Each structure stands twice: as C-alpha cells, then as structure tokens.
Amino acid sequence: MKSTPYNLVMSALYKGKKGDRPPAANPTSIVCRDLMDAAGVSFPHAHTDANAMAELALAGHEIIGFDSVMPEYSVHQEAAALGCEVDWGAPDRMPDSKNFPHEDFSEIPIPDDLLEKPSMRVVLDALSTLRRHVGGKAAVIGKVMGPWTLAYHMAGTQNFLLQIGLGEYEMITRMLRQLMPVTIAFARAQFAAGADIVVLADHATGNLVGAYHYEELLLPIHKEITAEIEGPLILHVCGNCEDRLELFADAGFDGYHFEWQVDSRKAVERVGHRLALLGNINNAQTLFQGTPEDVRKQVRYAIEAGVDLIAPECAVPLATPLENLKAIIAAVHEGY
Amino acid sequence: MNGKIEQIRDVVVSGKHKEIEGLVRTAIDENLDLDAIINDGLIGAMDIVGKKFGAGEIFVPEMLVAAATMKKGLELIKPLLKGEASQPKGTILMGTVKGDLHDIGKNIVIMMLEGAGFKVIDLGVDLSVEKVLAKVRELKPDVLGLSALLTTTMPEMKKVVDMVGEQGLKDTVKIMIGGAPVDSKFAEKIGADGYGKDAAGAVQLAKQLIGIN
C-alpha cells in the first residue's frame, strides 16, 4: 500500500494494512488563531462562506499536515437551519445559539428545503470544493449533529436534561425521532457532495448523562441511523465515556472519536476489535497549555496503545499554538 | 435523626419533587426545628446527591431534579426563619465567562450555594470582563465565582482575575473558578483564590474563603 494521506486514513479506519506511519486525522475542528492568520481566512467568515470554509480546511492539511480535511467548525449548522438564531462569533469566539425554539417540546417542522438552507448548503459546497482539490489525496471528512445534540439546541440543554430527570421519556423520544431524519439527510448529502467519511457528533457524554440514559433513549436511534447511512461513520462524543464504549460499538459505528479522559490502552482493549478508535490528544492541558514535547509524549502513548488514527480529542481552543498542532504531525511521522 | 427529616432527605435524594411540599409542611406543622429541616434534611440530601454524582451513580438529569426538589422545600421554610438564621452567610456573585454560554454547572452550583445559606446573585453567561468588574464594585460580594465549560474560554478567566487585581479589588473579593476544562493548577496559575471540583466542592470552598464552617 502506498502511504499517502488518503490511503492511511481509510485503511486505518477499517484496520487494514498499516503503512509507514499512523495517520493524523481531524474529526473535529483544528482551527486556531494561528491557523486563521496563516491561511488568511478567519471566523466568522469561514462558517458562512463555502470558499472560505474550504480554504481553512485545506490549510489544516497543507500548512499543519493533517491527513484529512474537515470543513465544519461549529456545531450550529443544523440548528440555524431549524430556526435557532445563531451568533456566528468572531476570530476568537466560537458560534453559539441565542434561543431554544422548542423549549416547550412542540412539534419541530423539518423544512422541505432543509439542505438548501444557507448554513447547510455552505458545508455541502465546501465538501465538493475540497473533493475537487484533494480528492484521493487527503481524506475528506464531513460532520453532522446527531438528534441528541440537536435536541439540546431545540429545547435547551438544561431543560432537555431536566425532562429526562423528571422521567418524561416519551416526550424525549418524540423529539429525538423528529430530529433523526435531519441527521440522516445531512449525512447522506455530505457523502453525495464528496465526503469520504462523516463524523456524527452526539453529546450524550458521561459528564452529563449516564450509560443507562444512552442505552435506553439513544442507542436504539443510533442503531437505526447507522443502518440508514451506508458510508463510513465516526461517532464523536466528548467527555468521559468509559462506561459506554461497548454500547457505542453496539450502535454500529465504524469508528469512535474519544477524549483523553478515557485511557487509550483500555479503550483499545475493550472495543478496539469492534471499531476504529480516533483521538485522544488532550486539549486543555496538552495542546493549549503544554509544549510540543508534551504533545509528542501523548501521541506516542496513543500510538503504542493502538489508537488507529491520532487526533485532538475535540475542537481545539482557538488560542492553541500552531506548533503544538504541528507536533502531532511530527510525532506520527516517527512511524509506528 | 428525626424520622420526618430523614424522609425529607430521602425524597430530595430520589427527586420525588411532587412529595416534598407536603412533607415539609407537615414537618413545619409538627414544630420541628427549622435549621434541622434545612441542614439535615434538604442540604444533607444534596451532600448525598453530590457524592452519588461524584461516584458516577447518578448524572445531571437526576441532580437537576434533586436540586429543584430541595429548592421547593427551602422556599417554604425561608420566610419562617428569624434572627441570625435568616441572615445570609455571605454574598456570592456567579457567572460564566465571555464566549461561554454553558450554564448548567454554574446553575447547579448556585442552587447548592443557596441551599447552604448564601445570598447568590447570578450574572448569567457570556460575561465581559467590564461587566463582571462593574458588578463587583456595585454589589461588593464576598466571593466571585467564575465558570467555563469550553477550553476556548479558559483565558477569559485570567482576564477577569488580572483586572480585579489591577483595579485594586483583590483584597475585597475572593475569586473561585470551576468548570470541566480547569483545575486547581490552572486556578493557581492565573491567581484565583480557589478551584471547586464539583458543586459540593464549590460550597466547601466558598465557606472556606469566607471563613465559616
């Protein structure tokens, strides 16, 4: 096998042949201020303009050296299309929703032209642009929000979690089922637009809910989603999810993108034979506040543990030094 | 512990929010010591809830319901408190720093602090350094609590701490920080007075910073 970025990513995702080195991937955003400066493209423009979005994604491959390109930097594309008022932020501030349009758990109408809403179209167009530029060279990664995360946006996170605590499972399930088609439609459209892989982010994290909540409320829905979407799907759930790794594998995902809070050796031992593992370089302490040598140590630890694709654990802080991101690449280039 | 108070504690721990008002009313009618209802019953329950949360036995949904249950009980008792017991133990300003709209952690901490007898003023989310400073000057709190969930917003905490120092307010207000990406090392590094690991930890820390048991 030729050890090209695209081949390394795709082969590692399916635990195929190992090339000269492990791949470095970015299932979530690796954009920081330094990268925006280097690319000459910045937030909030890169959330709303397809060319700017694609250009910034390319910079992650060309300037830093990641083996994949991923153009979605916010978690609000679908929320905006579903009626949330989104503040797209600034170069030093991530976007955020300003309202929760379905706090009362009312029926969520899915627009007929969902995929043509500007916040959705921009991602699809950026993926097509990336496909034209680096298709077959670097892996093109898309990203969609799962129904659980979308429900946080629709109802408000605290409200959604409170209703779970109050045992309103029927209401919760109704909302998740209303939102499921959004996830499926956007993922399919991203593959059609040129994505090789789609990341499905669904924040049923151990910092907020238990494995028992996931198993009862979301696992059945995830199983349906993975059955409906044919292309490679990577689940992203940040926080400590050590208590539910097997459940994620049961859900039928091809890979799981995880945080440093889950020890990579344990993760590989428990579910490494069932799905690919991506991660788990620490953001707050290592990439943001650490040195390139700290980064190198974590990358080597993850590689030795058997993590398939090396990546930051989650969207990196905007003040992350570029040299720390480059240290990830240098460490994977040392080989296995 | 009195059987009724034990019942109140259990109802809060298990989040039976529909039962709390009846129980607390009966306890009041039976002339049980109000302090005992609060401290052993309602707040005692939240200590247990905090421990269960720390041990991963329960999660935020259960914690929110328990806190709401406690609050319902507390609201029935508060108007009846007289003298020293009705005086707040101190004033705490709480808020989430600029760029961060996550407020669940902060809200749980507020409910626990109120339960513990503090007067808490919630400044909300996405707070600019200027707004925090203006509120510190205006309200003269004993403690300022800052929360951040995103690693992207951690640097905002340092800005607030620096500004409090520059404006000569460091001796009048103690600053505590909390949230998923921060730790005691970070608190020390930016010059905050303390770090609360979780809601129960924040209550302990606030007591310590104010100098009460």
Image (cartoon, rainbow, N blue to C red):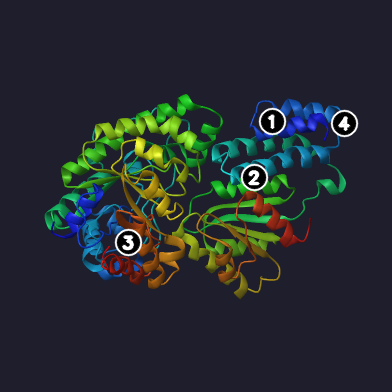
Residues at circles 2 and 3 in contact by the CB criterion of under 8 Å: no
Residue found 71% across the figure and 51% down from its top? B119
Pointers 4 and 2 within a single chain: yes
- Residue tagged by mark 2? B51
Mark drawn on residue B11: 1
User: Can you say which quadrant of the picture contains the C terminus of chain A?
Assistant: bottom left
Q: Is residue B93 above or below residue B35?
A: below
Q: Position of residue A252 (x, y in %)?
A: 31, 36
Q: CA distance from mark 2 to mark 1?
A: 16 Å
Name the N-terminal-most of marks 4 and 2: 4
Residues at circles 2 and 1 in contact by the CB criterion of under 8 Å: no
At label 1, the amino acid type is Val
In this rendering, which labeled residue sits more in front, label 4 or label 2? Answer: 2
At label 3, the amino acid type is Val
Q: CA distance from mark 1 to mark 3?
A: 47 Å
Name the N-terminal-most of marks 1 and 4: 1
Q: CA distance from mark 4 to mark 3?
A: 62 Å
Q: Is residue A140 above or below residue A296?
A: above
Chain identifier of the residue bearing label 2 in the image:
B
Mark drawn on residue B31: 4
Residue found 23% across the figure and 59% down from its top? A67
With B99 as the anchor, is A302 left or right in this view?
left
Task: Confirm whether residue B27 shows in the render.
Answer: yes
Residue found 24% across the figure and 62% down from its top? A21
Q: Position of residue A58 (x, y in %)?
A: 21, 61
In this rendering, which labeled residue sits more in front, label 1 or label 4? Answer: 1
Question: Could you say whether the residue bearing mark 3 is in a helix, strand or loop?
Answer: loop
